[in-house]
Amino acid sequence: MEDTRPVGARQARDLVRVAFGPSLVALVVIAAVTLLQLVIANSDMTGTLGAIASMWLAVHQVPVSIAGHQLAALPLLPVLLMIWGTARTTARATSPRASWFVTRWIVASALGGPMLFAAIALAVIHDASSVITELQTPSALRAFSGVLAVHAIGALIGVGSQVGWRALRALRLPLWLGDTVRAATAGLLALLGLSGAVTAVSLVVHWGTMHELYAVTDSLFGQLSLTLLSALYVPNVIIGTSAVAVGSSAHIGFATFSSFTVFGGDIPALPILAAVPTPPLGPVWVALLIVGAASGVAVGQQCATRPLPWPAAMAKLAVASLLAAVTMVVLGYAGGGRLGNFGEIGVDQATFGPAAFFWFFVIGAVTVVMTGGVLRRPKRVKPAALVVADEPEFEDNDEALTTPILPLADEPEPELQPDPEPELMPSAPAPPVRPAPDLEDVEDLMIVDDDIETGPPDR
């Protein structure tokens, strides 16, 4: 059904939806889950608002501190859903032909609404901490920066999907920069997808370990809670598997995992962590590097869809590889942090980014060259050489000429002879002259008035 409302009313409604839609949906879901857990656990409702506000900030990767223990290794699935929701609402509110003024208002709304929610959440937590002494108010700078970063990424993705090509033309940037986003996305999906498949296979192999981790609780509600918590941490485990796949390492406290070695240690009793390899490490884990190579092939194939001259083709591949590697580094940073007494959890940031860029760029470059992604310059046509007639060669005698040069003798002029007289052709004989016939005298033919006879007079 066609919307017949005025343009101003539609834009105002879109701005309100962009500003408060994703944050409000997340708040409702968090409140429902929190209240359900408190009711099932038959717990007191004191400090419920503080718990809801803390969980809303935790969705934006703001650390939660309880009784002096900091929980900074937060699950990635909620924050990814928040980014997706922000990108979707901003993309629906942005028209490809919208003015830059309207586009700026959409971005401002996507950032301003969540910042207001963050301020309210900090105030609620500060008020609840006076009742629940174990709950501590997080840093305001960390809270506002986390909320701003999450929604800025979502707004950039949503608005960029609508006006990205216009922005490139307006800034007079190469249009192949738009293709780098698609190539980087293909590489990320290949790396994360294959790492997820490896994680699933490892869970099947270590099924006994996962069963033991579920045995820490006997209640059905406890097992459901462990399952839900494991599902929230699935992206974190996949990021760790990706780090191992590109040649870097992941660690849970003192336990370190890579494709070449494993150092054991204490790990949290979370069923999803049953996928981590156990020492001694078998040689089959070295084959995990094939995942990194396959992701590089995916980047190269996307970059080769539109062939370019070799400098532009390599520049496009480098930008796509850098974009994908930076995204993996950001995900690795967001998925790590301190987890209470277990210590730091995450990936080795010093080697994760360079290793990911290596696979994306080097294997991608080989793929681009092999799949025809580099245009060859046309060969220059050489002009045809002019054919010059061979000049006669003269013998070059070094001896000087001693014979004097004689003057040329005057040639005698030929005597002029008179032109021969033309021969007279004999003319035809003249016709014979005959005497003229006797003609009457002209005077005899003349009539005189006197010679005419007149008739009798009229009576």
Image: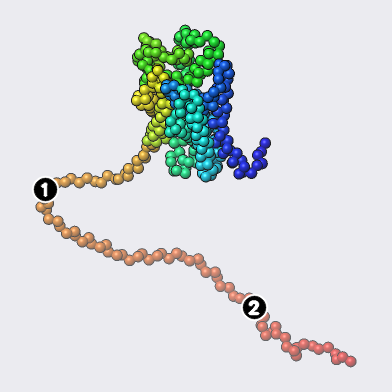
Mark 2 to mark 1: distance in Å? Answer: 108 Å
Mark 2 or mark 1: which comes first in sequence?
Answer: 1
Q: Nearer the viewer, mark 2 or mark 1?
A: 1
Helix, strand or loop for disc 1? loop
Q: Callout 1: 10 Å neighbours few (<14), some, many (20+)?
A: few
Residue 365 falls left or right of residue 37: left
Task: Name the mark on residue 377.
Answer: none
Q: Quadrant of the C terminus?
A: bottom right
Residue 380 spot, x, y in % from top left: 36, 39
Residue visible at 59% across and 41% down in the picture: 12
Residue annotated with mark 1: 399
Kind of residue indicated by mark 2: Asp
- Residue 442 figure quarter: bottom right
192 and 211: which is toward the camera: 211
Q: Is residue 273 visible?
A: yes
- Residue 16 figure quarter: top right
Residue visible at 50% across and 32% down in the picture: 123
Kind of residue indicated by mark 1: Glu
Helix, strand or loop for disc 2? loop
Q: Callout 2: 10 Å neighbours few (<14), some, many (20+)?
A: few
Residue 385 spot, x, y in % from top left: 32, 43
12 and 205: which is toward the camera: 12
Residue 43 spot, x, y in % from top left: 55, 18
